[in-house]
Image (tube, rainbow, N blue to C red):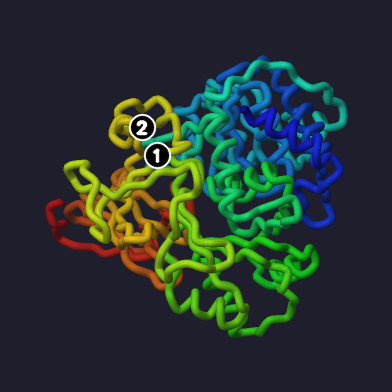
Amino acid sequence: MNLKLMLDEVVKRYGKKTAVAMGDSRLSYAQLDEASNKIANALIGMGVGKGDRVAMLMSNRPEFATIYFGVVKIGGIAVPLDTKYKLAELASLFDDSQPRVLVAESPLLKLIAQSLPGFKSIAHVIEVGGDGEGQFLSYEQIMATGSAEPVVVEVAPGDIAHIAYTSGPSFNPRGVMMSHQALVREAAMSGDGFGQTDKDIAVLFALPMHHAFGLVVILMTAITKGSTVVIVPGLSIGNLMEVIEKEKATIFMAVPFVHTLIVNAIEAEGIKHDLSSIRLWGTAGAAMPADISHKIGQYLGFTAVDFWGMTESAAHVTCQSPDGGGKPGSVGKPLSGWELKVVGDDNRELPTNQPGEIIVRGPIMNGYYNNPKATAGVIKSGWLYTGDIGRVDEEGWLFLSAGRKKDVMIAKGQNIYPGDIEYVLAGHPKVAEVGVVGIRDEVRGETPRVIIRLKPGEVATEQEIKKFCLGRLANYKVPREIVFTDSLPEK
């Protein structure tokens, strides 16, 4: 099974049903299929073939779905990118993935347009949201004049559908290669774990579609099950609550940071909307603070359903029961189709309740793009070594531990790699040496603290260092604390 055939089957059953909505815009399954055919034919006309990469620099919007499926229908490889990335980060990822086509929203395209000639692999650019009068082919032009004829391209289940750059430092990129087969399997397993059906309406809020949480857990799972996805742009909690009431949404999922924003908004303004349609209130991406989980239950009457996974596993591996049943503090049991073990440093399975590295087997990634050495370090005998530490109790419930074997911190559900920050600051003319550590933050989870030794005779301010980072790193990676020192401890 590939993603094209999966969509074909869903369209036959739910053609007139709304697949994706945002505001007053409604895209039915039949319209999603037709629009993605137009994209597919346009890409073929550009000479895009099997295995060619198409970079997608887009925020959450219905066009994301049509473009993604247009790419994979012809055996192309979608490369969804974080819209918060700065030019230096994008340049590193373009250099690694060598995309033949770039699809970007107008505001983002304007920021990098002058630099595009330097990216030699990019032969074509599609602009989304433009007026059609610019220098690039617009999405709107393709929709107005493109062919909606179904494409006939042989796509094997094992072919790569997308490369997700969320698993490693931007300046030493590790692109997760996910196959059609793995994504189809994971989306079906995910939907089964959530008890999801065509009657469900899932809200997509503050979960970027370039990330596995938004793309696979929400969008792809919903499409597999014939559900509807309602996109809520921005970060307004009031707007979120209004949309839940208006659309009678049944599923809402978010990272703990967003749950904290919801609790804060309720405590400040109360609850002004009817949220009783929600049947599944989920959380993942980081550990949910116990007091926030308690307040969600107290204020809204929902039990936050925890689940756990990673980009390398397509999406989530474990999940608590959708009805909120489960052990407090656990992220659930493995979904049907997943195997999970906890092992020690000698790779032997550990006894019950003993913490060690979590390894999983199921629809995992094919590997890291252009990086067989890194792939061999995490995939061994078919098992994915996650780097996360946890324990499994006598009833099979997984509990995550605070430690990680990976050099990574998680802020608001986003991975931050110290190597990115160190790489950027190593280029500062006043910096002699730099180190980065994660510090606990009750709201964000973790935030980066930078320790800097300046070159002899140099003077710098915290504001100067942050401004330097802000011009070169995604905002969420910019350190919140800068500490100047005469010497750094040895690692």
Q: Which is nearer the N-term, disc 2 or disc 1?
A: 1
**Is 457 drawn above or below residue 376 in the view shown?**
below
Circle 2 is placed at which residue position? 382
Residue 32: x %, y % from top left: 78, 38
**Residue that protrudes farthest toward the front in the picture:** 395
Residue 426 appears in the figure: yes
339, 291: nearer the viewer: 339
x and y, in percent, of residue 38 in the image: 79, 27
In this view of the protein, which residue sits in the foreground, 352 or 107? Answer: 352
Q: Amino acid at mark 1?
A: Arg
- Mark 2, other Cα within 10 Å: few <14 / some 14–19 / many ≥20: few
Residue at 48 percent of width and 42 percent of height: 337
State the CA–CA distance, disc 2 to disc 1.
Answer: 7 Å
Where residue 11 appears, as percent x and y from the top left, is 79, 36
Q: Which residue is mark 1?
A: 361
Tell me the kind of residue under disc 2. Gly
Q: Are marks 2 and 1 in contact (CB under 8 Å)?
A: yes
Mark 1 neighbour class, 10 Å CA radius: few under 14, some 14 to 19, many 20 or more: some
Is 437 situated left or right of 215 in this image?
left
Where residue 404 sits in the image (x, y, percent)?
29, 54
Image quarter (top left, top right, bottom left or bottom right) of the N terminus: top right
Determine whether the residue tagged by mark 1 lies in a helix, strand or loop: strand
How many labels sit on residues?
A: 2
Q: 269 above or below 178?
A: below
